[in-house]
Image (tube, rainbow, N blue to C red):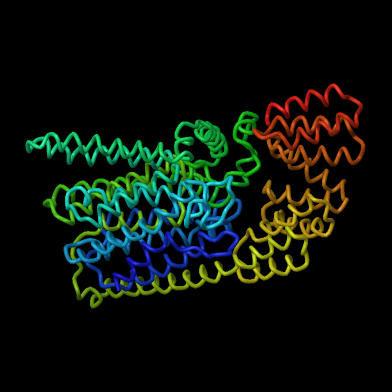
């Protein structure tokens, strides 16, 4: 059964739901929960140590306390779209760490460890052609030409993280064991990392690769094989550089500073948002609604507010936001334990297959942590890292008669209960994933004007996934896209669904924007003005409300107010073309051709 669990774990990043609206997360969660269920039933080869177990308990406890103390305990406990990282997913991560300790530690787990290594090799060989094709501008799995799709992960940096973890795990064995399959797998994982275009992932792989290959080269150098030593290090750097520069999209990102600057602005705003809630945090899923009230003109002009960030894109800030300082400290303590135990185990082992696995696992876990300094966790990337951390922490052979004593019976019952809950999680996630099909259908129908059929599809999704708090919001946004084109029926539908979303999340800028668009689409300008006024009062740095309020004022012949709002909208976005185009037309209507010509000049420079 351990081999089945390992198969599910290495295959999870490849799972997605074709024709789903967001087809990447819930299918993976279903597979991972199933893997956890089976992993808890596998006869153990080792167990988790006491310090690690206590730290995990503190991690969960601090999260629950923070969630219950947050403004929206339901969102914090259940998690929200798109990654649903609430308490069930946190327990999944914890459970996979325990399962990794049970299955992958100890001398008797050598076959399972080997199977995991080989399985990762094959999964990387599957991802390589997709990643390279997407880096070259093709879209074998669909997606627009203007986005970085990220293969079966749905996010390019997630794709880079999967490649990073696999490459760093496989690299020690590839260097010292001379196993051809592992060498091919490590190379494929490296290509996946580079093709993702993630600078953080590429940098971590290169730095860790230099350390590992440098160690191998030093051994060659001290044994008299100096030419081979120099060739090993030089060859690695040349190959890494060649791969990075041979793919135009990757080379362009390596020298771009836009996202780096954007991260700095985001971190500054995140710190502001957390400044008054650092101890208990905001609660999982609430960052996206809190952040807009803590932005700035510089953030809006340089980063843009069209797509509100749902994470600080830094693991330290993410953990503090989700569970507060205690949660962050528990996670940091767990990381320290993993590193300390990993180094101790590596030193105690002779140079054999197990030691190479431990070196790779520790390097992969640490490399993943460093890469998350500019990104966020997600089920597709975090699950395997948890399993590897468990493999490092597993200790002390398990005695076979443990269930006979009373403590043993309690642990046995707890384990079976956890396995049962994991099975429930797999079923819920699988059923929830099926709701992505009518969600996609509803979105497509709304775009084509089939409003009543779209509403039925969204109602079906809501019935399938009643625990998801964001179905109303996603439906409202789909109808709002159509309402902007003047479809009054779509506007009415947008008002209905957005009102439900605002009732659930009153501070959601996305829901308020969809509501205002729907109100304008139905001709209820007064209601739209009130919605936009409250939104601007809450977050005066968001461009879209100013643009919409400018349009509403123009419809009421308040040209001076409309011009002021549209000027503000154009100033609060790095892509002001839409606002400037409307502004130019309004200046003509207002009888100010000089101003209109000036705006046209600004537009021409942008184009």
Drawn side of residue 5 relative to residue 514, left or right: left
Question: Is residue 183 or residue 427 the one in the foreground?
Answer: 183
At 44% from the left and 57% from the top, the residue drawn is 380
Residue 283: x %, y % from top left: 54, 50
Q: Is residue 193 above or below residue 92?
A: above
Q: Is residue 341 visible?
A: no
Q: Quadrant of residue 559?
A: top right
Q: Is residue 258 above or below residue 76?
A: above
Question: Is residue 56 or residue 218 the one in the foreground?
Answer: 218
Q: Is residue 318 above or below residue 468?
A: above
Question: Is residue 386 or residue 129 the one in the foreground?
Answer: 129
Drawn side of residue 100 relative to residue 499, left or right: left
At 50% from the left and 59% from the top, the residue drawn is 25
Q: If the image is split into quadrants, where does the N terminus sit? A: bottom left
Q: How many marks?
A: 0
At 72% from the left and 63% from the top, the residue drawn is 445
Determine the residue located farthest toward the top in the rendered image.
Answer: 594
Residue 548: x %, y % from top left: 79, 41
Q: If the image is split into quadrants, where does the C terminus sit? A: top right
Residue 449: x %, y % from top left: 78, 61
Drawn side of residue 510 relative to residue 35, left or right: right
């Amino acid at each position: 059964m351990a081999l089945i669990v390992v198969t599910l774990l290495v295959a999870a990043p490849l799972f997605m739901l074709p024709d789903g609206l967001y087809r990447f997360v819930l299918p993976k969660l279903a597979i991972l929960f199933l893997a956890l269920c089976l992993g808890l039933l596998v006869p153990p080869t080792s167990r988790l140590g006491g310090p690690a177990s206590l730290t995990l308990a503190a991690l969960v406890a601090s999260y629950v306390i923070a969630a219950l103390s947050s403004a929206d305990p339901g969102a914090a406990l259940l998690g929200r779209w798109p990654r649903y990282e609430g308490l069930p997913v946190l327990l999944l991560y914890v459970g996979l760490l325990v399962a990794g300790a049970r299955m992958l530690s100890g001398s008797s787990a050598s076959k399972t460890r080997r199977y995991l290594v080989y399985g990762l090799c094959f999964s990387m060989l599957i991802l390589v052609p997709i990643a390279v094709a997407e880096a070259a501008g093709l879209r074998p799995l669909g997606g627009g030409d203007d986005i970085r799709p990220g293969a079966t992960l749905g996010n390019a940096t997630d794709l880079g993280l999967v490649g990073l973890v696999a490459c760093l795990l496989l690299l020690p064995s590839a260097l010292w064991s001379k196993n051809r399959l592992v060498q091919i797998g490590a190379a494929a994982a490296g290509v996946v990392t580079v093709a993702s275009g993630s600078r953080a992932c590429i940098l971590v792989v290169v730095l860790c690769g230099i350390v590992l290959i440098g160690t191998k080269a030093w051994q060659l150098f001290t044994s008299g094989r100096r030419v081979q030593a120099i060739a090993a290090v030089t060859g690695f750097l040349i190959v890494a550089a060649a791969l990075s520069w041979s793919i135009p999209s990757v080379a362009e990102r390596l020298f771009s500073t836009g996202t780096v600057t954007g991260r700095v602005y985001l971190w500054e705003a995140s710190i502001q948002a957390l400044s008054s809630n650092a101890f208990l945090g905001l609660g999982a899923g609430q960052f996206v609604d809190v952040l807009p009230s803590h932005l700035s003109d510089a953030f809006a002009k340089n980063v843009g507010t069209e797509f509100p960030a749902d994470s600080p894109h830094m693991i330290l800030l993410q953990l503090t936001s989700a569970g507060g300082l205690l949660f962050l400290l528990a996670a940091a303590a767990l990381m320290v334990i993993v590193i300390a135990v990993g180094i101790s185990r590596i030193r105690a082992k002779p140079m054999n297959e197990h030691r190479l696995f431990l070196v790779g696992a520790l390097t992969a876990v640490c490399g993943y942590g460093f890469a998350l300094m500019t990104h966020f966790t997600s089920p597709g990337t975090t699950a395997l890292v948890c399993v590897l951390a468990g493999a490092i922490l597993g200790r002390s052979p398990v005695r076979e008669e443990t269930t006979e004593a009373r403590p043993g019976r309690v642990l046995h019952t707890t384990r079976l209960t956890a396995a049962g809950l994991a099975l429930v999680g797999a079923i819920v996630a699988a059923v929830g994933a099926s709701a992505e099909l009518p969600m996609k259908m509803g979105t497509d129908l709304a775009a084509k004007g089939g409003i009543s059929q779209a509403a039925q599809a969204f109602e079906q999704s809501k019935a399938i996934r009643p625990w998801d708090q964001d179905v109303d919001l996603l439906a409202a946004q789909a109808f709002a896209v159509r309402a902007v084109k003047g479809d009054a029926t779509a506007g009415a539908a947008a008002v209905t669904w957005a009102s439900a979303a605002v009732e659930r999340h009153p501070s959601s800028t996305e829901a308020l924007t969809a509501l205002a668009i729907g109100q304008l689409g139905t001709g209820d300008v007064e209601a739209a003005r009130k919605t936009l006024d409250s939104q601007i009062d809450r977050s005066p740095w968001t461009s879209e409300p100013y643009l919409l309020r400018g349009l509403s004022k123009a419809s009421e012949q308040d040209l001076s107010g409309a011009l002021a709002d549209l000027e503000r909208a154009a100033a609060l976005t790095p892509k002001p073309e839409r606002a400037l185009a409307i502004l130019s037309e309004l200046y003509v209507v207002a009888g100010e051709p000089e101003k209109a010509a000036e705006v046209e000049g600004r537009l021409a420079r942008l184009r």
